[in-house]
Amino acid sequence: MIEVSNLVKHFGKVRAVDGVSFVARNGAITGLLGHNGAGKSTSLRVLYGLLKADGGSARIDDVDVLADPREAQALVGVMTDAHGLYPRLTAREHIHYFAGLRGIPRAEMTSRTAKLIQRLGMDEIADRRAEGFSQGEKMKVCLARSLVHDPGNIIMDEPTNGLDVMTTRSVRALLAQLKAENKCILLSSHIMQEISVLCDEVIVIADGRVHFQGTLDALAEHTGVRDLEEAFVQLTGHAQGGN
């Protein structure tokens, strides 16, 4: 489970995150919605240890991210929209490399890698160098390396950005499987249809603050509209003074 309470982050005079609080539960997919600059990516970067908060708290499975970032990082798998692959390494070598960083023994590393390659349908690219990979192939490698240590919590920033229809469907199917395994999944996305299909709860952030958390039904009741995009615009438009 991921818990954030009164999180604050400044960049100079800009208060990018202004008292953000939310909970992402085990066995559920929680969607994080917000316009560009709303504070959602900054909040995620604090969660996985890339940024240090100026105030508040964040916990992953009851481990304090701010006080013990290394222990917290061991409990989470992170997939960002910046793939950062090494072009001369194969897909299999990428997964092995990240398994090594996680301290997984070599024998177990080999078996885990083989299972992830099969699970993600990566057999054809497993021993190809990453240079020249399609967007979907890059995404599969990034997803595999984020799951190699079998984390209980998974953070994804725009997981299907730029993917074709079939790859997007395979990612959605995998997320459903991970949810069934009682994983806590927190994902940021601009694709309203994806949020509608996948998420059990949504969090709407605007101007560095949370303006709603709850189910899609609760959001419809709160805003008076069933359409997620319209509800999002209504909440964030109000937060920005209607602009």
Image: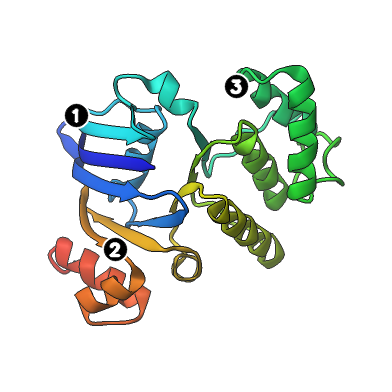
Residue named by callout 2: 214
As helix, strand or loop, the secondary structure at mark 3 comes to: loop
- Horizontal and vertical percent position of residue 17: 22, 41
Q: Amino acid at mark 2?
A: Gly
Q: Mark 1 — residue?
A: 12
* Point 34% across, 32% down: residue: 62
Question: 110 or 190, which lies in front?
Answer: 110
Q: Disc 3 or 2, which lies upstream in sequence?
A: 3
- Residue 15 on image: x %, y %: 17, 38
Q: Is residue 230 above or below residue 113?
A: below
Q: CA distance from mark 1 to mark 3?
A: 34 Å
Q: How far across and how far down the image is residue 161, in percent?
A: 55, 55
> Is any atom of residue 132 visible in this view?
no
Q: Nearer the viewer, residue 93 or 180?
A: 180
Inspect the image, locate mark 1, and give the three-letter code of the amino acid beneath it: Gly
Q: Residue at x 21, y 40 (%)?
A: 5
Q: In the rendered view, does 2 fall on the left or right side of 170?
A: left
Query: Total marks drawn?
Result: 3
Numbered badge on residue 182:
none
Q: Which type of secondary structure does the marked residue at label 1 adopt?
A: loop
Residue at 51%, 47% in the rendered image? 183
Which comes sooner in the sequence, label 1 or label 2? 1
- C-beta proximity under 8 Å, tags 1 and 3: no
Q: Is residue 46 left or right of residue 97?
A: left
Asked whether the viewer can see residue 203, the reply is: yes
The residues bearing labels 3 and 2 have C-alpha atoms spaced at a distance of 34 Å
Work out which quarter of the rendered image holds the C terminus and state it.
Answer: bottom left
Which residue sits at x=35%, y=71%? 216
**Amino acid type, callout 3:** Arg
Check whether the beta carbons of the residues at disc 3 and disc 2 lie within 8 A of each other: no
